[in-house]
Image (cartoon, rainbow, N blue to C red):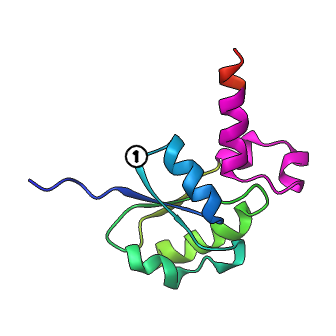
Amino acid sequence: MADAPRVIAMVEAEKTAVIASLELPDYTWLACGGKSHLSVTKLTRYARQRIVLFPDGDGFALWAKVARAARAQGLDVIVSDLLETELSDDQKAEGWDLADYLLATNDERSHT
């Protein structure tokens, strides 16, 4: 019996994909190279897999719009609201991404 395909996790930056792959290895991490580079066309390459988008702190609305369009074409796409709910307004304005969040929370865990 074949293993189930791993969930695709999409982030903006390559460095975020690398850091996230170390912290959350159950996903296959990919980077789109920039917030505005995410598109339905790019996501259709992974049409047979579940896709979870992890936008930067300032990119939730844009990526949610792309996800809605992708779902309208039958793709299994969701947008993580982790950074949308966990980051402060200042952190969002500073451009925090998933890597920043993971490193900060990892640092907090190591000091407790």
69 over 61 or under it: above or below: below
Quarter of the picture containing the C terminus is: top right
Residue 30 visible in the displayed image: yes
User: Residue 74 location, x and y as percent?
Assistant: 40, 75
Q: Residue furthest left?
A: 1
Residue at 68%, 39% (x, y): give it.
103
Q: Which residue appears farthest toward the bottom when viewing the image?
A: 41
Measured as percent of width and height from the top left, residue 10 is found at 54, 63
Q: Which residue is label 1 attached to?
A: 26
Q: Nearer the viewer, residue 71 or 53?
A: 53
Q: Identify the magenta region.
A: 82-107
Q: Residue at x 39, y 56 (%)?
A: 7
Total numbered circles? 1
Q: Secondary structure at mark 1?
A: loop
Q: Amino acid at mark 1?
A: Asp
Which image quadrant for residue 18?
bottom right
Q: Confirm whether the magenta stretch covers residue 93.
A: yes
x, y (%) of residue 90?
91, 47
Query: What residue occupies the far top of the structure in this picture?
Result: 112
